[in-house]
Image: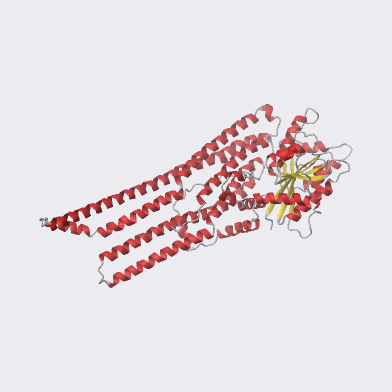
Amino acid sequence: MTHKFITIAFAGKRDLPVANQVPEAIATLFAALDAEFGHTNLHLATGLAKGADQVVAGVFDTGNWLAEGTTNTKSMGAVIAFGKDDYLETLKNPESTEEVDLFTSLYDKCTHKLHLDGVYAPGVTGKPLRSRAHRQQGRFLTRMADVFVAVAAKNSESLAGGTLESTLCALQSGKPVILYNLADSLFYYYRDAISWTLDTEQASSVADIVKAFKKEFYSLKQDDAAGAIQSYHTEIEKLSKPTSLMFRLRKMAWFYGSGLTREPVAVKSLADAITNKRAELSNINARYQSQYRGGYMLNYLLASVAVFIAVMATCFYIYFPESCYWRYIILIMLGIVKVVLILIIISNTKTINNNNFNKMAIEYRYVSERLRANLHLAFAGIFKAIKPSLGNHNKNYLAAYPGEVVYQHILNNIFETEFEITLNSNDLLAGTEAIEKDWYQTQINYHKKETEAKHAMHSRLEHVAEKMGAWVLRIVYFELGLMSVELLLLFLKSHHIEIPGNIEHIVEKVGHISPVLLALTTLLPSLVITLISLNFQTEANRLSVRSERLINEINGAITDLDQKRNDLQKPERLSEGAIFMDLLSEYDKMSTITTDEVAEWSLLYEKNVPET
């Protein structure tokens, strides 16, 4: 089973020297990747341009670099700056069809074919448009890369949309770069734009470079791929299996459920597959969310019942004389019930914590939100949401990175079939309105309802706790008053002062309820503490504030998208084409907001369940 997916984006010089070692060198690099990684799909994404692109694609396609018995697989994708017909025009030669034939043979072997919305214009006057299209192509290859491989002379002139510019763009985006320098026929590994600009890196062996990349790759995606994917398939199977009694009790104990959904309108046939997967993931998330939060609730409820039983035992002990032998039987039975309740609380707590219900809830919520972005990115003809930045998120969010492996696994299964898409600038602009409505606005509507629901929950819990607290005070005041009256009667008796008979009789009758009042003053405070604890655990007020802030952030993203759309639809700009990456950058803002939301949401699940 393939567990990991590495996208190798490639860009290279169009005019290679006649005598070059590029095929042999690149084959060595691919072989090192095959040797270092296992159970991995190596996906080469290239523009299939003349020169290095086609040479490297040819080497990759042969598969001769794959070791015998390897557990890895390979696939290839083409990202073309123009429409197919326009691109073929650039290759036509009256004297030979060799270039067209080579491109076509490699193109047909690509499983994923994406034609960007660049405008092709021949001649010197068309160079600015071609440069814009190639620059967009480089930006897109950079975006989808796990590692960016370049073949060029390091100190040659950097052209607009050329290999060196794309390489610098990759480094500025935080992507590692492997450069095969044509100037000295050596490999170099770069991790940041500063080392590239200052030219401080030394040549390294292919083996060392691949080891360095592997270390970087696994720092982002923990090496739990096999376990994460196996766990995902196990969880899917669990959805159709019967659940235990404790599972159902925890689920029933979690009384709060907003009942809100954020399923957007499906677009294109691929969206149906994403929607189905999101439904499964949402069910898994809801399963563990209810188990974790319900575990808290169940423990508090059982603890309150245990307190109530203890109070009942006290009442039995006070009210019934020692001569009643069955009093002891009842007290023993109540004691056994208390022990059983405590054992259930301990067992419930250990089950939740040992099975990491909190982490599972975070992980599958994360994958679900990542897929939500993909559903809307299908409008734009891309099926891979931008990776979130690790530096912005808390430790539990980092722990969800097995979820990133699951996310890539799901995408690979959804989009493993071949596709060929040609983007059009006018269609991309028209699609922004649907994306804004079905993604941005849907999120705003959801968070508005969440704000109201969480605020109402906070207010109700706070109100009930205040009412119970007030009743505790009233009972205590009544008890104090009753004891004061009894003390006064005792004082009057000791001084032989006559007391009306009915008053003493009334006080004596009222005194019989003292144990009940004592029970209430014991039980009610425990219920108040439970409600306060539940209010704290649900963090409803803070979540309400968070939803309000997210609404403001999404409104800001809508403003930015509207502004970008207005700029791009101006006739002079629209005629230049290559607007895809500009729009995609705006969508990435929204994708980041939704994945950041998971980071904040995961704080609710940061603690293990206490034994109350």
Q: Nearer the viewer, residue 587 or 112?
A: 587
Name the residue nearer the viewer: 590 or 82: 590
In the picture, measured across the screen, residue 20 lies left or right of residue 481, that is right
Q: Position of residue 191 (x, y in %)?
A: 71, 43
Q: Quadrant of the image for the N terminus?
A: bottom right
- At x 70%, y 34%, the residue is 578
Residue for point 54% across, 57% down: 356
Q: Position of residue 406 (x, y in %)?
A: 63, 53
User: Where in the figure is residue 257, as x and y percent of width and height?
Assistant: 47, 50
Q: Nearer the viewer, residue 169 or 464?
A: 169
Q: Looking at the image, can residue 105 be seen?
A: no
Specify the farthest residue to the front: 495
Position above or below: 565 against 10: above
**Left or right of 524 in this view: 436:** right
Observer able to see residue 168: yes
In the rendered picture of this protein, how many numbered marks are placed on residues?
A: 0
Task: Give the vertical position of 432 relative to 487 (above or below).
Answer: above
What residue is at 32 percent from the left and 71 percent from the top?
Answer: 329
Residue 112 in the figure: left or right of residue 387: right
Which quarter of the figure is the C terminus placed in?
bottom left
Specify the color scheme.
secondary structure
Q: Can you give x and y, in whole percent of width and height, for residue 302 in the image?
A: 41, 59
